[in-house]
Amino acid sequence: MRFILFITIFSCFKFTFAQNPPKREFRGAWIATVSNIDYPSSKFLSSEQQKAEFVNILNQHKQAGINAVVVQVRTNGDALYPSELEPWAEWLTGKQGQAPSPFYDPMAFMIEECRKRGMEFHAWLNPYRAVANVNTSQIADNHIAKKRPDLLLAYGNLRILDPGHPESREWVTKVVTDIVRRYDVDGIHFDDYFYPYPVSGQTLNDDATFTKFNRGFTNRADWRRENVDLLIKMVSDSIKSVKPFVKFGISPFGIWQNKSTSQLLGSDTRGLESYNDIFANSIKWTQQGWVDYMAPQLYWYIGFSVADYDKLTKWWASNANNRHLYIGQAIYRVNADANWNANEIPKQIRLNRTTSGVNGSIFYNTTFLNRNPLGVRDSVINNFFKYPALPPAMPWKKANQPNAPTGLIATLIQNEIQLKWNKAQSLANEIDKVKRYVIYRFINDEKIDLNNAKAIRYITNSDENSFTDSEINSALKYTYVVTALDRLHNESTPTNEASVQVITQIEDEPEVAETELFQNFPNPFTNKTYITYFLSKGSWVKLRILDNLGVERLLLVDEWQSVGLQSIEFNNKSLPQGVYMYSIETSDIMLTKRMVVE
């Protein structure tokens, strides 16, 4: 009866199988602070509550396979960190300019917690927005809107720093440089708000600035675009001069220009154009090498007639200009309508992975990702982010490898394998320092292949030189190698190989008294797995593989076997992708386990 029930349960599930996972992939999540969208959940939390909430967010992201967070630290000319330039953000304490109590540095805390989990921290800033709504926003005395009202432009109730004024560019660059100097950020990140998005009935009057600072331009649109270009280049140059290893990325609106008779380079879309409507010439920024990555916000579904995710992903990939491309994905839209069903985000991830030039994605936003709409977060974890991934390296920042660790030793102690190695020689230059290590594990006669993402057993969170592998199975040989990573994820050559045969230790353990069927390993698998079981007494044994309806597909063992541990190597040549069971039947017991073929 138990066996029949087991079959009935699993026959009701629909399983989606992932492609072979990439070894390198940027897996990011935006954490929005404006209006308390993601963090903190309220502007009236205590400092300790804020810390606990952020730790919980990171723990959830780590469990989901996220390896980078993009945290909004400047929303409206304010700061989520102590700054001599701009006031504290109201989203943190309820009042702009008011410090958290008891006092602490939120950004320093967030970076430290990211380091504990081996996650990148990108500081997200809105460059121009100064006051979201002059009728409702409370403005501190040291805010740029009060200190330099001559630098502001009005657009309805919105106030922005005037992109055409040289001092606006200098101010934003000064703010960015201050962050880069004082904090151990991995990246600086700008969002999509440049010139204001067009609103019916509103106009942007920058006549005075155009008259005074036109630099010889007669076309206002071209002048506005170059204003933004000048800021991007200035910020880029500043970051490189202070800390050349810090990345600079931008998440523009998803459409640059629509393809037309006058613009053949545009995408096959019919939506708002960032080039013409908000004067953001994002393609130029990659062409000139001013940014390290682009994260276009492709917040539409595959097949959308106005802006098709499929077409836009491929268009952006063809225009990446040898810079990284991380696609912004709208997990917040899942379950909004029939087009945003449980399969949409998985389909988008598959498309990303099969499109040359795409290096990963960033989910918007954290709150919706962790709410797990329609089980999409679970699907991403189980089918796509099950194995860890290294963020992509950036050879234009640094091409040489770090030094390799040495002297790897693997020791079997009880039912765990303890690894130790000598740290790699780390150079004094920050860009060359070894920050983390990658532990690779190979089973029995598996070939040592550092390109096999499934072989990554663990990526350390810091430069520790030991690891304990407690997820081992009996009757198997494990071989390990370790590599070193610098802060830009360049990888060294591997250590020596260190191997351990587990079967001897398990056989010596007297406490296994009953017949037992162990979980096959690896599982899921593509070509080969090992099925291990312990016989409490000699018996005729049948070991079979069944489909999820209980129909026998393969008979692996049909013979008398003696008491003790048995291990069968199963090389799959006929089973298609799917969920199966393997069953052992002796003279007095029948046991089953679930297995997955990818």
Image: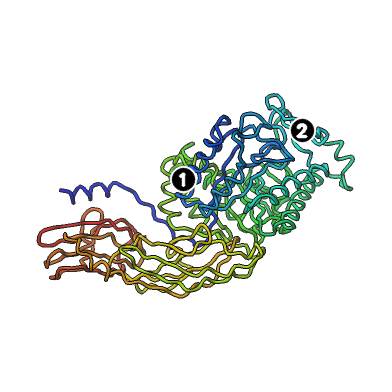
Q: Could you tell me the amino acid type at mark 2? A: Ala
Q: Could you tell me the amino acid type at mark 1? A: Gln
The tag earlier along the polypeptide, 1 or 2, is 1
Read off the residue under disc 2. 145
Q: Where is residue 23 in the image (x, y as percent from the top left)?
A: 49, 62
Dot 2: few (<14), some (14–19), or many (≥20) neighbours within 10 Å? Answer: many
Helix or strand or loop: what does disc 1 sit on?
Answer: helix
Using the rendered view, name the quadrant where residue 513 is placed.
bottom left
Dot 1: few (<14), some (14–19), or many (≥20) neighbours within 10 Å? Answer: some
- Horizontally, residue 516 falls left or right of residue 243, namely left
In whole angstroms, how far apart are the C-alphas of marks 1 and 2? 38 Å
- Residue 97, disc: none
- Horizontally, residue 576 falls left or right of residue 367, namely left
Q: Which image quarter holds the C terminus?
A: bottom left
Residue 382's place in the image compared with 342, above or below, is below
Q: Which residue lies furthest to the top in this view?
A: 135
- Horizontally, residue 214 falls left or right of residue 2, namely right
- Residue 60, disc: 1
Residue at the spot 28% in from the left edge and 46% down from the top edge: 12
Using the rendered view, name the quadrant where residue 557 is placed.
bottom left
